[in-house]
Image (tube, rainbow, N blue to C red):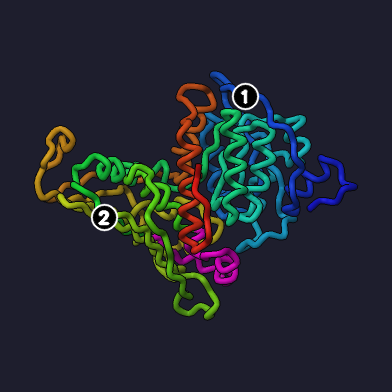
């Protein structure tokens, strides 16, 4: 905790730079859309592995956003794989938290601090009533994120969590098809998020968190899988943890997560000695199956670390779907018995689509989805269940 001799703003500066606790503040007034103009953005933190990708996506969306500056969090003692590269960031002003809240007063803050600091920083931003794009995971303490989310909900403040497949058209189409009943009753979902970042410190980094690779990555599948079951909580969620081949015995770098539903199972596999281009998804139902591989062009995601050299270019994403029989022509319009192929152009930016949607919310063109707060709370609960942690029911 910050010392009692520190002023409020000194405490916030300590939070930004060293991960210290924030000072409580009365919530701001009800949020209102900004109208028909660009949203002014502050990028808070550069330690997170997705920071560079989010930074570049905001800069790319010149019709939606104006980058006004960033907050440096490099003094944080939180675990990270590698020190961030300052290239590009230093072309813009670097603000203290006090300047952000009192002088800059941005329309949006993109929160890209370390995993350990995300909830603490975002809670202080929420108290100031500023919309956020907040990266994940959302902390190993269920209550912390819940409190922060409810501050945002009470003020109607847009809160977008950086689940990286939310704007993936191919995955969204698979969810739509699965929910429609075209595949019959869904009984199995299998997803692979293997990777090979290659950084020597990865075993230590992943194992720092409860659940290791399940904590860091399973949430990305849980987030889109749950809506297939109408966001119903699984009967049970649990994981098996192992070291990946070649890693120390203590490493939590190989995980298998199982979400058990009454008549269905969801399995999520993550191994740190795998291959990103072969990440895949398969969904099975009583009337057919569909699969997607690859699920994105991994060369374009701009992860802080990673062995991207030699990865094949992906021009399109293609769902391969087999239907036993078109049993509902209205819902299955355009499909036929047997093999169907549904293609999408591979996006050149993993995050731009999600941030474009957020820009429309900020301008008031589309509503801030009220059900999204609860959905994210449910996803967080199940994500912690996947780490074999004790959780409470979401009210």
- x then y, percent, for residue 92: 69, 39
**What residue sits 70% from the left and 29% below the top?**
105
Asked if one can make out residue 360 in the rendered structure from this viewpoint, the answer is no
**Residue for badge 2:** 263
Check the image and report above or below for 332 versus 214. Answer: above
Q: Is residue 139 above or below residue 60?
A: below
Dot 1: element: loop
Q: Residue at the location (23% across, 52% down)?
A: 290
Q: Is residue 395 above or below residue 156?
A: below
Front residue of 145/106: it is 145
Q: Is residue 215 magenta?
A: yes
Q: Which residues are magenta?
A: 193-216
Residue reaching furthest to the top: 36
The span from disc 2 to disc 1 (Cα, nearest Å) is 43 Å
Q: Please indicate whether residue 80 sits to the left or right of residue 383 in the image.
A: right
Asked if residue 391 can be seen in this view, the reply is yes
Q: Which residue is mark 1?
A: 30
Residue 236 as seen in the image, left or right of residue 264: right
Q: Residue at x 36, y 54 (%)?
A: 313
How packed mark 2 is, by other alpha carbons closer than 10 Å (few <14, some 14-19, many 20 or more), is few
Residue 21 colored in magenta in the image: no
Q: Looking at the image, how many numbered discs can be counted on the residues?
A: 2
Mark 2 touches mark 1? (CB < 8 Å):
no
**Rendering quarter of residue 109:** top right
Residue 53 placement (x, y as % from top left)? 53, 47
Is 350 positioned to the left or the right of 22 in the image? Answer: left
């Amino acid at each position: 905790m910050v010392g009692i001799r520190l002023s409020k703003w000194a405490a916030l500066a300590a939070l930004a730079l060293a991960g210290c606790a924030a000072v409580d503040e009365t919530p701001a007034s009800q949020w209102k859309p900004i109208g028909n103009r660009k949203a002014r953005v502050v990028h808070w933190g550069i330690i997170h592995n997705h920071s560079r990708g989010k930074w570049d996506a905001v800069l790319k969306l010149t019709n939606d956003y104006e980058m006004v500056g960033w907050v440096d969090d490099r003094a944080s003692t939180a675990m990270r794989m590698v020190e961030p590269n300052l290239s590009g960031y230093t072309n813009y002003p670097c603000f203290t938290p006090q300047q952000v809240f009192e002088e800059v007063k941005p329309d949006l803050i993109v929160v890209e601090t370390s995993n350990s600091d995300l909830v603490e920083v975002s809670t202080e931003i929420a108290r100031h009533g500023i919309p956020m794009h907040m990266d994940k995971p959302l902390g190993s303490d269920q209550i912390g994120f819940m409190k922060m989310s409810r501050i945002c909900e009470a003020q109607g403040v847009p809160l977008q969590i950086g689940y990286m497949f939310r704007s993936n058209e191919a995955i969204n189409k698979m969810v739509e098809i699965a929910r429609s009943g075209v595949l019959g009753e869904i009984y199995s979902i299998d997803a692979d998020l293997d990777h090979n970042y290659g950084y020597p410190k990865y075993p230590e980094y992943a194992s720092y968190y409860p659940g290791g690779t399940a904590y860091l990555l399973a949430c990305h599948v849980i987030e889109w899988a749950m809506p297939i079951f109408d966001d119903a909580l699984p009967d049970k969620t649990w994981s098996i943890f192992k070291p990946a081949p070649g890693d120390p015995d203590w490493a939590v770098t190989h995980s298998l997560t199982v979400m058990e539903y009454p008549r269905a199972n969801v399995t999520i596999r993550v191994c740190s000695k795998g291959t990103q281009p072969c990440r895949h998804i398969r969904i099975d139902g009583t009337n057919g199956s569909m699969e997607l591989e690859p699920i994105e062009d991994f060369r374009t995601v701009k992860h802080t670390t990673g062995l991207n050299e030699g990865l094949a270019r992906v021009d399109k994403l293609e769902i391969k779907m087999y239907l036993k029989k078109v049993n509902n022509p209205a819902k299955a319009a355009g499909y036929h018995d047997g093999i169907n192929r549904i293609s999408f152009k591979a996006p050149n930016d993993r995050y731009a689509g999600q941030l474009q949607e957020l820009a429309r919310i900020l301008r008031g063109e589309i509503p801030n989805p009220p059900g999204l707060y609860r959905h994210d709370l449910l996803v967080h609960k199940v994500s912690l269940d996947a780490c074999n942690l004790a959780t409470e029911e979401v009210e």
